[in-house]
Amino acid sequence: MSIKWTPALAVGVSAIDQQHKELFDHVAKLIDAMKNSDAAEVGRLMDFLGAYVVEHFRMEEGLMQRYAYPTTRCTGPPTSGSSGTTASCEGSSSPRGR
C-alpha cells in the first residue's frame, strides 16, 4: 500500500496544501515503519501525527472562520482542549461538525 499526495488533491491554499503534503509524507513513513515492525519509529510518527493534525485542523478552522467559509458556521475561535482542538462548528466542511 502506498500513499502519496498529488496536485489533484490541492485545495488552492498554499499553507494548507503544504500541511497536507506533510501529513501524507508522514503517513507514508508510518506505513513503512509498521511494515518493518519498527516500534520506536511507529511511536515517534504517531506522536508527531497526533500533534500535527491538531495544529492542522486548528489552522484550517481558523481560516474557515476568518474568510467566512460558506458551509461552516463556528460560534467561536478554535481552542485547545483536553482532547485536541474544540470549536462549536456545523457544516459539511467542519471535521467535527458532522
Image (cartoon, grey):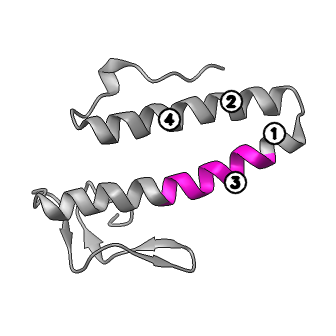
Q: Are marks 2 and 4 in contact (CB under 8 Å)?
A: no
Say which amino acid is labelled 4. Glu
At label 2, counting other C-alpha atoms closer than 10 Å, the crowd grade (few under 14, some 14-19, many 20 or more) is some
Main SS class of the magenta portion in the image: helix
- Identified at 76% across, 47% down, the residue is 44
Residue matched to label 4: 22
Residue matched to label 3: 47
Q: Nearer the viewer, residue 50 or 96?
A: 50
The location of residue 11, given as percent across then percent down, is 25, 34
At label 1, counting other C-alpha atoms closer than 10 Å, the crowd grade (few under 14, some 14-19, many 20 or more) is some
Instruction: Identify the image quadrant of the N terminus.
Output: top right
Q: Nearer the viewer, residue 2 or 79?
A: 79
The location of residue 59, given as percent across then percent down, is 34, 57
Say which amino acid is labelled 3. Asp
Q: State the separation of the CA atoms marked 2 and 1.
A: 9 Å
Asked if residue 30 lies left or right of residue 95, the reply is: right
Residue matched to label 2: 29
Asked if residue 33 lies left or right of residue 95, the reply is: right
Q: Does the stretch in magenta take in 50?
A: yes
Question: Is residue 52 placed above or below 33 in the rendered structure?
Answer: below
At label 4, counting other C-alpha atoms closer than 10 Å, the crowd grade (few under 14, some 14-19, many 20 or more) is some
Tell me if residue 95 can be seen: no
- Identified at 45% across, 31% down, the residue is 21
Residues shaded magenta: 43-54
Q: State the separation of the CA atoms marked 2 and 4.
A: 11 Å
Residue matched to label 1: 41
At label 3, counting other C-alpha atoms closer than 10 Å, the crowd grade (few under 14, some 14-19, many 20 or more) is few
Q: Nearer the viewer, residue 74 or 15?
A: 15
Choose the circle earlier in sequence order: 3 or 4. Answer: 4
Q: State the separation of the CA atoms marked 4 and 1.
A: 17 Å
Q: Secondary structure at mark 1?
A: helix
